[in-house]
């Protein structure tokens, strides 16, 4: 058994300086230490998949990241680990607890995952070793993680057994409740614009210093078709992860960050709204382009017509949100986001469908990630 700082201090010396995750009782000593005022930067996530996307955004801002989760939550992280970290070659150090592990009498819900945790990591092509249980093991574990990450640019996992870290009973800060935000309704009730036309308006308004993350599917494809810029990241896979990635980026850069989201993707990870609302980066603008369908998969309807996205955003902690259903309304809403601190939320209704003959980005995801990171960090 080690103390939390027996791991955290050498990890910081090795450059691991940003943490995200979801609590587990095995992780309590580590999480309590990183949440404390003297600890490294930490963003608590609503889900394990969100934590992976947050850490990916932080990596794009130049941070070396750690994602902490229970092995039961590893299932929530399978999608971003395989469809975000792998294609974009984004590394992170995973600390995965081994509930239901060998010789552990645990709750019934941990039985299957306890049996398959190392096998699941193997299937995801994530190398791993046991989390250090003595001070003498820490240096070797970190050295192996660093070496593998340097070679692969992919995640490496440390599997934490019960009782690996001593609980020193640290106190964590209490979240501060803020006043409810406001919603500005700029809807006009006319014919809905296409996503293509809204993206044209957006590109005409956004400046060259703003980082833009476009959600998976036709949003990123249309953005690329209109104008491929180094300030753009076209997310593939990891549906629902764009706003979490935007959060991880925004809390680690002074640049303005804009997330171009979709209704289906936003619905998939509504917990992201609460996390963004809590950490409240003033430089983040979150835009949901809502056509009421899953456009990339054949136009199946979403449940968005019954969802008040703008109202949900302020209920989750965004100070300002806007409703728009026209090109002019979108321009007014976006201009408003430039005048006051965020995070801001724009719910923009658009017509179903996309441009004819729509292609896909021709720049490989790992190349997109690295030129984007270079843009964000200034080299």
Image (spheres, helix red, strand yellow):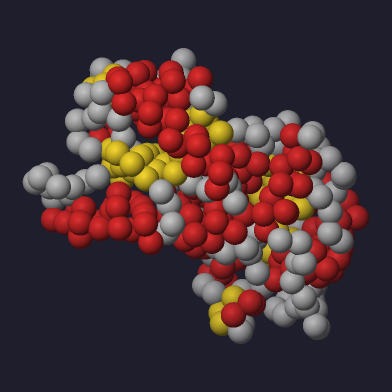
- Establish if 287 lies above or below 150: below
Q: Position of residue 212 (x, y in %)?
A: 74, 50
Relative depth, front residue between 89 and 227: 89
Residue under the point 29% across and 52% down: 118
Residue under the point 31% across and 26% down: 137
Relative depth, front residue between 335 and 125: 125
Q: Is residue 278 visible?
A: no
Residue 150 appears in which quarter of the rendering?
top right
Q: Position of residue 6 (x, y in %)?
A: 35, 18
Number of numbered discs:
0
Q: Position of residue 44 (x, y in %)?
A: 44, 37
Relative depth, front residue between 229 and 379: 379
Single out the residue that lies furthest toward the right: 204
Q: Quadrant of the N terminus?
A: top left
Q: Position of residue 265 (x, y in %)?
A: 57, 63
- Please state if 254 lies on the left or on the right of 202 as rendered: left
Residue under the point 35% across and 25% down: 138
Q: Is residue 291 visible?
A: yes
- Please state if 211 lies on the left or on the right of 147 as rendered: right
- Please state if 101 lies on the left or on the right of 267 as rendered: left
Residue 236 appears in which quarter of the rendering?
bottom right
- Establish if 70 lies above or below 327: above
Residue 329 appears in which quarter of the rendering?
bottom right
Q: Quadrant of the C terminus?
A: top right
Relative depth, front residue between 133 and 300: 133
- Establish if 174 lies above or below 350: above
Residue under the point 28% across and 53% down: 117
């Amino acid at each position: 058994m080690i103390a939390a700082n027996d791991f955290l201090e050498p990890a910081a010396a090795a450059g691991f300086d940003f943490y995200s995750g979801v609590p587990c009782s095995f992780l309590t000593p580590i999480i309590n230490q990183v949440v404390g005022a003297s600890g490294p930067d930490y963003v608590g996530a609503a889900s394990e998949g969100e934590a992976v996307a947050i850490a990916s955004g932080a990596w794009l801002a130049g941070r070396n990241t750690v994602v902490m989760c229970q092995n039961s939550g590893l299932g929530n992280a399978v999608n971003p680990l395989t469809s975000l970290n792998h294609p974009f070659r984004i590394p992170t150090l995973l600390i995965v607890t081994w509930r239901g592990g060998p010789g552990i009498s645990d709750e019934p819900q941990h039985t299957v995952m306890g049996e398959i945790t190392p096998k699941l990591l193997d299937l995801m092509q994530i190398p791993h070793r046991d989390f250090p249980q003595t001070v003498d093991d820490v240096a070797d574990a970190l050295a192996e993680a660093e070496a593998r990450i340097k070679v692969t640019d992919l995640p490496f996992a440390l599997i934490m057994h019960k009782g690996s870290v001593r609980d020193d009973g640290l106190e964590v800060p209490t979240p501060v409740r803020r006043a409810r935000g406001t919603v500005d309704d700029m809807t006009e009730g006319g014919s809905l614009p296409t996503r293509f036309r809204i993206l044209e308006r957006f590109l005409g308004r956004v400046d060259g210093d703003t980082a833009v993350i476009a959600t998976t599917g036709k949003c990123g494809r249309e953005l690329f078709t209109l104008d491929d810029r180094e300030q753009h990241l076209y997310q593939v896979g990891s549906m629902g992860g764009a706003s979490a990635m935007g959060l991880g980026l925004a809390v680690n850069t002074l640049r303005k960050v804009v997330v171009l989201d979709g209704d289906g993707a936003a619905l998939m990870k509504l917990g992201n709204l609460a996390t963004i609302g809590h950490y409240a980066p003033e430089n983040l603008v979150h835009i949901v382009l809502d056509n009421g369908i899953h456009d990339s998969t054949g136009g199946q309807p979403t449940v968005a017509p019954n969802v008040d996205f703008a109202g949900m955003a302020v209920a989750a902690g965004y100070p300002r949100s806007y409703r728009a259903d026209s090109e002019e309304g979108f321009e007014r809403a976006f201009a408003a986001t430039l005048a006051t601190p965020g995070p801001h939320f724009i719910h923009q209704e658009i017509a179903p469908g996309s441009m004819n003959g729509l292609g896909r980005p021709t720049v490989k995801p790992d190349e997109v990630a690295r030129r984007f990171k270079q843009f964000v960090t200034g080299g």
